[in-house]
Structures are given as C-alpha cells and as structure tokens.
Image (cartoon, grey):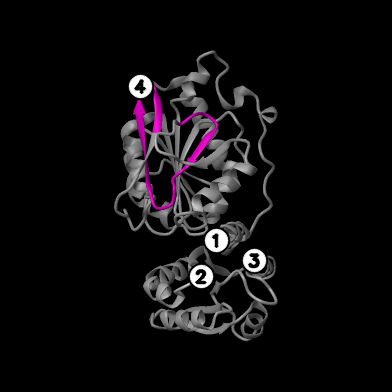
Amino acid sequence: MNRIKVMVVDDSAVVRQVMQGILEAEPDMQVLGAASDPLFALDKMAKNWPDVIVLDIEMPRMDGLTFLRKLMSERPTAVVICSSLTEKGTETALQAMAAGAADVITKPRAGLKEFLQQSAAELVHAVRGAAKANLRALQARPRPPAAVPTRCSADVILPASGQAMAQTTERVVAIGTSTGGTQALEQVLVRLPRVCPGLVIVQHMPEKFTASFAERLNSLCAIEVREARNNDRLLPGLALIAPGGKHMVLKRSGAFYHVQVLDGPHVNRHRPSVDVLFRSVARFAGRNATGIIMTGMGDDGARGLKEMFDAGAETFAQDEASCVVFGMPREALKLGGVGQVVTLDDIALRVLESGRRRASAAQPT
C-alpha cells in the first residue's frame, strides 16, 4: 500500500508533536517530518516531497499564505490549512482557500493539545481528502471578469416579455459542493449577471466561516451573495449560502420561495447538508428547479440530486477534470441523478440557459 506522505509545518512544538502522533497512527499515512516554518520545511522536503502539507498561517520568517502561493505557482501540492479562528484569521483562511488550499481546519488559541486530540478524525479525513485532490484544479486561476448587465441582453438571460421577470422569481438553482468548492463557486458566481435565477447554496464550511465567505463573494460578484437568514425570500440575482453549523431548506409560500435555517443533527457527516437542501428543493420546487453538484469528497447530495431529477428538475454535475475531488459528482452519477456532466467554466452559462428556458415553459407546481 502506498502511504500518504505528510509534512507538518507549524511554529508550535505542541501542535507538531500531536499532529505527528495522530497521523502516524494511521496505517495509510507516513509523516516525513515537521518544521517550525516554511523555510525549514523546504529544506526537508527537498529530499522527499510530500503528498500533503498540513500548514499553519502565522509563522516566523514566512507566513503560510505566502508559502501556499509559492507552492501553487512553482510546485502544486495538496495543502490542508490548520489555523486559529479570529476575525482576521478567518479572512486569511478564506484567502488561502482561494489560493488553492484543499481544506481548512480551525483551531483555538488555547487548549491546542486537547482540541487536536478531539479533532483527530477531522484531521485524518482532511488529509485523506487532500491526497485525492486534483492538483491542476487546485491551482489558483486568473479570475474571469465579473459579469455586468451591459454585457448580456435580457434575451440571453430571460425571454423579452412582461411576464418573464415575474416568472423568474419562481426559478430556483440549488448548488451543493465541498472540498474545492470555495474556489469553484467563485468561478461560477462572478460570471453571473445581476439578472439571473435565485440560488440556494450549501458549501461545507465550519461555523463562522460562511458569513465571511459570502461577504467576500459579494464584493466580487454582480449578483448579491450573503449568508442565509431564517425566512429570507429567494429573489432573482440573489445567492443565499447556508450558514455553517445549520441546515437550510427551501419552502414555498404562494408564488414565492423562501428559506428556513434549522438546527438538527449532522446528515452525511455534515451540517449544512446538501442532501437536506436538495430534498427540500425537490419537494417544493420540483421541475421549476435546477440542481448542480460540484467538487467535493463523499456522497452528500447524491441522493438529494436524484430526488430532484425524479421530480423533473434539470440536474448537472461538475466534470472530473475540473473538480478538486470528484467524489460527490461521482456518487450522484452512480445513482442516476445527473442529467448532464459539464465543465466548471460552463456551469454559469447552464444556470442562465436553464432559467431562460423554464421562464418561458414552466408551469406552476
């Protein structure tokens, strides 16, 4: 068995010691070494390059974000960020994911040893997922120019009729993604013009990350992007992202849709869960919806997408070549819930085409 080779880079001796112990206890992993900063790590890695690097952000001599960008430009390598959660740290971690980190684990500033021991399964899961990552997809790509209304006519987006705008309020696009999704979602959402179907999105992220993630996307996009609040109405040109640590479901009230943000147990090891969102969309939007499953590890969303497909929704899966991890789309394909496989670059166009077709042809559910 080829073991996953791991390098731990953290300026805390306690963190290095505990992480090494956790990872070395796994039969499929080999810790090549540990270093207190990226420059020491580079010296050690020159002889034996790792498959995965577990990387802190704040370190002496070179910070983790600078090191990550250097890696992705010179020798792309799967990286799991393990950083402290402060307001500033959260933004830094989001920048790291945009720069190509495969996953992020958050850690407190106090009680590190106990926290890491309790979160051993999360660390191991993240390293295994990173080892399967598509490094070409992980590399930060130049951001496409944000769409503006003047670049597309209404005919490209919706039928030129008095009723078209009203009908698009009944269109729903549901997206589910996990590992690699932060970067992939940015690629999709910045391409959407202000007039587009409303979107409900589950991105597997820890609590407190989703608000900053949504704010960052909102600053880049022509559409409005924000973390969902209970009873938010879904409108054209609005993307609602499920809060970390909560489930989000779609509901219908008369001709309009809104979301509910709920507590509850983890589903498929996740909260929010893509399956929970997709099932609610299948039930309350049916054929008036489009479902898209994107890069991610595991099978969350596969069953829900099949339910959407069976309810008459259009369904798409991101292709393997552009996925960081093809797990979620693969499982959806196995269940027969995918109508078409599309590239990451094509997803935004398919969202707009789907909304345009359904605006002229859909009947009320």
Residue depicted at x 62% and y 70%: 58
Q: Mark 1 points at which residue?
A: 86
Q: Which amino acid does label 3 sit on?
A: Leu
What residue does disc 4 label?
254
The quadrant the N terminus occupies is: bottom left
Q: Which tag is nearer the camera, tag 2 or tag 4?
A: 2
Image quadrant in which you'd find residue 286 = top left
Q: How many marks?
A: 4
Looking at the image, is mark 2 or mark 4 earlier in the sequence?
A: 2
Where is mark 2, residue-wise?
A: 109
Disc 2 from disc 1: Cα separation: 9 Å
| Residue 80 placement (x, y as % from top left) | 52, 68
Q: Which residue appears farthest toward the front when viewing the image?
A: 110
Q: Is residue 96 left or right of residue 229?
A: right
Q: Is residue 359 above or below residue 326?
A: above
Real-space CA distance between mark 4 and mark 1, rounded to the nearest whole angstrom: 42 Å
Cα gap from disc 3 to disc 2, whole angstroms: 19 Å
**Position in image of residue 57 (x %, y %):** 60, 69
Q: Which of marks 1 and 3 is nearer the N terminus?
A: 3
Who comes first in sequence, dot 4 or dot 1?
1
Mark 2 lies on a secondary structure that is loop
Disc nearer the start of the sequence (2/1): 1
Question: Can you give x and y, in whole percent of width and height, for residue 261 in the image?
Answer: 37, 42
> How far apart are the alpha carbons under marks 2 and 4?
48 Å
Q: Can residue 345 be seen in this view?
A: no
Camera-side residue of 266 and 32: 266
Residue extent of the magenta highlight: 234-258
